[in-house]
Amino acid sequence: FLLFQEESSVQALIDACLEEDGKLYLCVSSPTIKDKPVQIRPWNLSDSDFVMDGSQPLDPRKTIFVGGVPRPLRAVELAMIMDRLYGGVCYAGIDT
């Protein structure tokens, strides 16, 4: 993951990418591989947290970790899915 301080830096990275089938790629070289295309997926940090019920205090004893979450999934979508399946979700956070 790359975290940029300025939105203009994100735009510069996107501008440097190649687009293929609606996906963004940047060619990166290493000592063993030259110009390997890697996928770039811009993501808004505001999509990493979602408070569903702010009146409920967060209780670490009632907190779960969910691994293997698809990268494009936003916290609001994760909260809605888990609430629909199990109920009682008050907060969802996706760590990057």
Image (cartoon, helix red, strand yellow):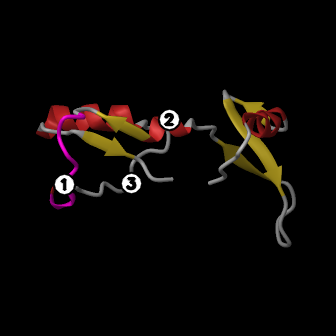
- Say whether disc 1 or disc 2 marks the residue closer to the N-terminus: 2
- In this view, the residue in front, 34 or 76, is 76
Expressed as whole percent of the image width and height from the top left, the position of residue 45 reads 54, 40
Identify the residue under disc 2: 46
Q: Spatial distance from mark 3 to mark 2, Cα to Cα?
A: 20 Å
- In this view, the residue in front, 24 or 48, is 48
43 displayed left or right of 51: right
Identify the residue under disc 1: 59
Q: Amino acid at mark 1?
A: Asp
38 displayed left or right of 92: right
Expressed as whole percent of the image width and height from the top left, the position of residue 74 reads 43, 36
Mark 3, residues whose alpha carbon is within 10 Å: few (<14), some, or many (≥20)?
A: few
Identify the residue under disc 3: 68
Mark 1, residues whose alpha carbon is within 10 Å: few (<14), some, or many (≥20)?
A: few
Expressed as whole percent of the image width and height from the top left, the position of residue 58 reads 22, 49
Magenta span: 54-61
- In this view, the residue in front, 95 or 19, is 95
The residue positioned 17% from the left and 40% from the top of the image is 56
| Outermost residue, bottom side | 31
The residue positioned 63% from the left and 40% from the top of the image is 41
The residue positioned 66% from the left and 27% from the top of the image is 22
36 displayed left or right of 77: right
Element carrying mark 2: helix
Does the magenta-highlighted stretch encompass residue 39? Answer: no
The residue positioned 66% from the left and 52% from the top of the image is 2
- Say whether disc 3 or disc 1 marks the residue closer to the N-terminus: 1
